[in-house]
Image (spheres, coloured by chain):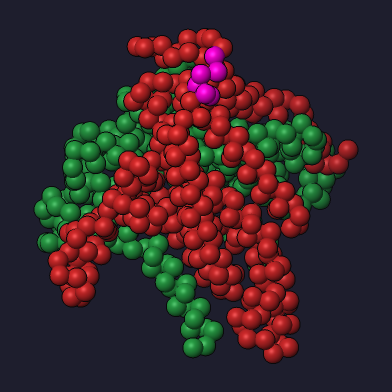
Amino acid sequence: MNAAWFRALYTGGVIAFLAAPLIVVAGVSVNSQRSLVFPPEGISLSWYAELFVQSDWSSALINSLLIAIGAGLLAVAIALPLAVHAWATKSLLARALFGLGVAPFMLPPVISALGFMVFWISFGLYGNMLATVVSHGIFLVTLPLVTISIGLADLDELMIEAAQTLGADRRTVFRTVLFPMIRPYLVSGFAFAFVLSLNEYIIAYMVAGFSVETLPIKIFNSLRYGYTPIMAVVAVMFAAISACVFGLVGWFGNLPRLLGAERT
Amino acid sequence: MTSAERVGSSILTAAIPAAMLICFFVLPFSIMVAVSFFERVQGAFFEPAFVLSNYERFLSPFFGSVLATSLLLAAGASVVSVAVAYPFAWMLVQFRRRGQTLILVFVLAVLSLSEVIIGFAWSSLLSRTAGIGNLLAFAGLVDAPRSYTPGLAALMLGLCYLGLPYAVLVIYPALSRLDPAIPEAARMLGASPLRAFLGTVVPLSRNTISGALILVFVFSLGAYLLPQLLGRPQHWTLSVHITDQAIFQSNLPFAAAMAVLFLMISLLLVGVSMLLGRQRS
């Protein structure tokens, strides 16, 4: 067997392994009956409508979206000034802050989840949606921090110098040169944080799981009472949202570069 | 002062994010460490005190077996994931950029899937009615379809599914930076593709492999839902017990003590992997 065949077979095999559960879930989600059967018996999209009709599911959907948008915006708002500062000064303080921003993401999430839980208990916001938004925002700050830093590293400093020579002050340079050039990295940082917040379970659960149900929490809670195809619908939808978001990032930006590849 | 410094060096730009991170990240962790020395109060959360009893519970045989289970499961998942991901990442690097992007989008989408969804999907796939059981029966390999979950094998499979995309994304950047001229030179000198790979790429990226093993290990240690959805109670890991103590046993001080231990282990391992990464560059 020659090398090209082996390569196709191996990569194909790994991709098939990664895709297999998604294919089964997609099949299950179009069952016409409330049953866990694959291949599906009778094709029907009614369960997709149920997600929006059944109020407990649709309210979980709205919670998830609100939290993900809020957390993504917060993460970007913290990451942008921090990344710019670290890029401009390269000081020890800036690097320490950068490390602090990357740390939550490197650790097992249950540790941060418990930290956030005792924190919100101490300050009386335990069980509040705001607690979930802020916790997610801090937890996911790593992603915009890394993407924006990559964008800044690629920046041509001569452009900034030119603007300054022409008399632009700090604010004008930021608004007219720096910001437009790093905007794509800002958007992809938001996109990454948004998708991961949508899928995040343990922090949302420990900070406010009993009062603010997100979709992952809702799925886990309903698994205890048995099966409904709406779970499969959510799984398919989440996979589709992630694929779309990352697809857009890959289409408009340089995904290999964003993930740290240099020689492309 | 460089032009960059003139734009972004104002201390004010760093003050707000610094305050946010200290308030919402350093402070929660400090409170958690403090709570680990507190006393448990029935019916409430906790009461300030300074006791070591929460840490003394680590010495029990039960806790020892929980720790051993967590470490063994994570180690197994990490070795399998890296072993599968490494050749995959190398092949991925050879693709044209468009193909690379396409596969990376897919890998990222799988990576970001919620653990609930992964657990649910695998329990469907391994169930009696909707997956492998059916397929095997249809092919006549077994007499009647049966369920393969919950169990150790199902849990391992789930953990590897969780770790594999992560391993790919950890290994891929390092391999993409490797100079392709080196394995090419080996090929020119008559080595087979496999031999060129094993003789040049693997030794050159030894630190990448050890770094990836550690990072995937820490990542798998964090799995929280899979042990509950695909495993049996004896497979519950440290992550599961921390949450169980915090929420269902309402023993936050003990949960905090476990989390502090967990934090120490993870920080140590992540630190080692960063050192390995530095040597590499």
Chain displayed in green: A
Seen in the picture, residue B43 relative to B214 is either above or below; the reply is: above
Left or right of A226 in this view: B258: right
Q: Residue at the location (32% across, 36% down)?
A: A217
The residue at the far right in this view is B1
Q: Residue at the location (37% across, 30% down)?
A: B244
Seen in the picture, residue B39 relative to A186 is either above or below; the reply is: above
Which residues make up the magenta segment? B51-56
- Residue A65 found in image quarter: top left
The residue at the far front in this view is B61
Q: Residue at the location (18% across, 46% down)?
A: A228
- Residue B193 found in image quarter: bottom right
A49 and A13: which one is in front? A13
B40 and A47: which one is in front? B40
Q: Residue at the location (82% across, 47% down)?
A: A162
Q: Position of residue A241 (x, y in %)?
A: 39, 51
Residue B63 in sight in this render: yes
A156 and B25: which one is in front? B25
Q: Position of residue B179 (x, y in %)?
A: 72, 71
B172 and A57: which one is in front? B172
Seen in the picture, residue A179 relative to A25 is either above or below; the reply is: above
The tally of labels here is: 0
Chain displayed in red: B
- Magenta region, mostly helix, strand or loop? helix
Residue A134 in sight in this render: no
Q: Position of residue A264 (x, y in %)?
A: 65, 67
Q: Is residue B217 magenta?
A: no
Q: Position of residue B118 (x, y in %)?
A: 36, 51
